[in-house]
């Protein structure tokens, strides 16, 4: 597809195989909104990944958008928050430096720097697809800065040897002669889960063979604790953990584990229970037949892990619970909405979850 005056072209990369959902979906009675039930009961659709190659564009490191002579590349428009475009366009007119004579692949993603979930679900799969391009080895790779050891380890696990690379600093705008981005970074990840499977399999298959995971040894049931985060804190989590211990469920804190430890833990688990959060993205490394039981505060219910679970052939269970009242943060508009989603605490119905665990074990 050609854009204005040859500004860009797109290469469509189809998933490696057709999608045939193998796992089951079990939505609790707590999910009583018909629209929510329909969204979570829907089967994940296979959608193509598109690589967009742009000639002569400025990459804005704050928004992740691309501009050419002040024009916003449409494929990156969805990365902008409200009222951001004019400021981002102004930054693009004064690039910090230039990369000329080299092809650039960008896996920079504005939400990935401090969010392990976006990193595993979008950045690594985009990188994996780029690596199939013959020009990748001699390219320049744009990377987000990250202080998270698990992200750095996962990057080297996938890439092994970094090509020439540039860690993007805050507020940088970079002019590139020739830059390629992926729709995995510019669109919501829902619907592309099958396209991510080759990357996840490349990580877990050797590990499963090496550690003989495909044996009859006991597989643990784990609970993904959120005691290490402040966003959407669960007020009665300790009581939930105590109840789950009666079923032999082990609490784990993903941020205290290495990337390799997280892959191994999720790859060996039989049942995974947890509130929606970045740690659950590790279900990408689960084996078919594993159970995911996801808990939601009703004000924040993305269904991204539902899609990943389906793509991995897992059995998906979910319930939602009411959050606490909205705190008065003295903000308005989109900023208030984002802060409220992060700031609102909530509590779960422990007897209800106990009954659901018994149902899960009976199904299993």
Image: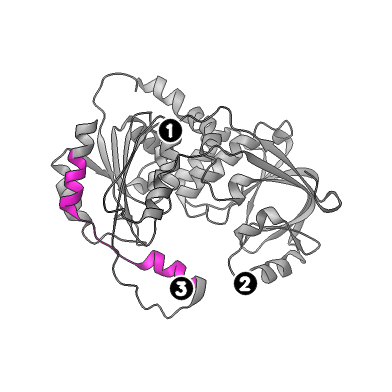
In the rendered image, residue 296, in percent from the top left (x then y), is placed at 33, 54
Confirm whether the magenta stretch covers residue 288.
Answer: no
What kind of element bears circle 2? loop
Q: In the picture provided, is 364 more to the left or to the right than 202?
A: left
Vertical arrangement, residue 86 with respect to residue 66, above or below: below
Residue 350 vertical position relative to residue 45 in the rendered view, above or below: below
Position of the C terminus by quadrant: top left
**Dominant secondary structure, magenta:** helix
Residue at left offset 34%, top offset 59%: 298
Q: Which mark is residue 336?
A: 3
Determine whether, in the image, residue 69 is placed left or right of residue 318: right
Q: Residue at x 73, y 62 (%)?
A: 96
In terms of image quadrants, where is residue 355?
top left
Could you tell which of marks 1 and 2 lies nearer the N-terminus? 2
Residue at point 16% right, 54% down? Answer: 239
Image: magenta residue range: 335-358
In three-dimensional space, the C-alpha distance between marks 2 and 3, rounded to whole angstroms, equals 14 Å
Name the residue beneath numbered marker 2: 83
Quadrant in the picture for residue 21: top left
Q: Is residue 107 left or right of residue 321?
A: right
Real-space Cα distance between discs 1 and 3?
35 Å
């Amino acid at each position: 597809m050609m854009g204005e005056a040859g500004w860009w072209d797109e290469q469509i990369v189809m998933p490696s195989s057709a999608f045939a959902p193998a796992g089951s979906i079990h939505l609790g009675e707590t999910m009583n909104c018909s629209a929510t039930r329909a969204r979570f009961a829907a089967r994940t659709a296979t959608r193509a990944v598109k690589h967009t190659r742009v000639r002569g564009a400025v990459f804005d490191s704050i928004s992740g958008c691309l501009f050419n002579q002040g024009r916003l590349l449409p494929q990156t428009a969805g990365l902008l928050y409200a009222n951001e475009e004019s400021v981002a366009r102004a930054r693009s007119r004064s690039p910090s430096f230039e990369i000329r004579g080299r092809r650039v692949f960008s896996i920079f993603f504005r939400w990935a720097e401090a969010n392990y979930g976006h990193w595993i679900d979008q950045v690594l799969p985009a990188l994996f697809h780029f690596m199939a391009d013959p020009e990748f080895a001699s390219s320049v790779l744009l990377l987000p800065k990250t202080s998270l050891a698990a992200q750095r380890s996962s990057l080297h696990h996938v890439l092994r040897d970094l090509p020439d690379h540039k860690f993007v600093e805050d507020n940088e705008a970079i002019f590139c002669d020739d830059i390629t981005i992926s729709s995995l970074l510019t669109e919501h990840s829902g619907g592309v889960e099958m396209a991510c499977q080759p990357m996840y399999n490349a990580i877990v298959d050797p590990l499963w063979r090496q550690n003989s995971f495909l044996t009859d040894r006991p597989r643990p049931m784990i609970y993904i604790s959120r005691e290490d985060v402040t966003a959407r804190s669960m007020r009665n989590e300790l009581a939930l953990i105590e109840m789950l211990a009666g079923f032999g469920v082990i609490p784990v804190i993903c941020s205290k584990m290495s990337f390799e430890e997280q892959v191994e833990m999720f790859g060996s688990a039989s049942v995974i229970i947890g509130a929606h959060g970045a740690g659950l993205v590790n279900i990408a490394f689960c084996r078919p037949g594993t159970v995911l039981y996801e808990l939601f505060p009703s004000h924040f219910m993305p269904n991204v892990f539902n899609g990943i679970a389906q793509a991995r052939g897992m059995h998906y269970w979910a319930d939602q619970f009411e959050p606490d009242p909205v705190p008065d943060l003295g903000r308005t508009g989109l900023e208030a909405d984002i802060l409220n989603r992060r700031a609102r605490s909530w509590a779960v119905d422990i007897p209800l979850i106990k009954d659901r665990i018994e149902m899960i074990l009976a199904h299993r």
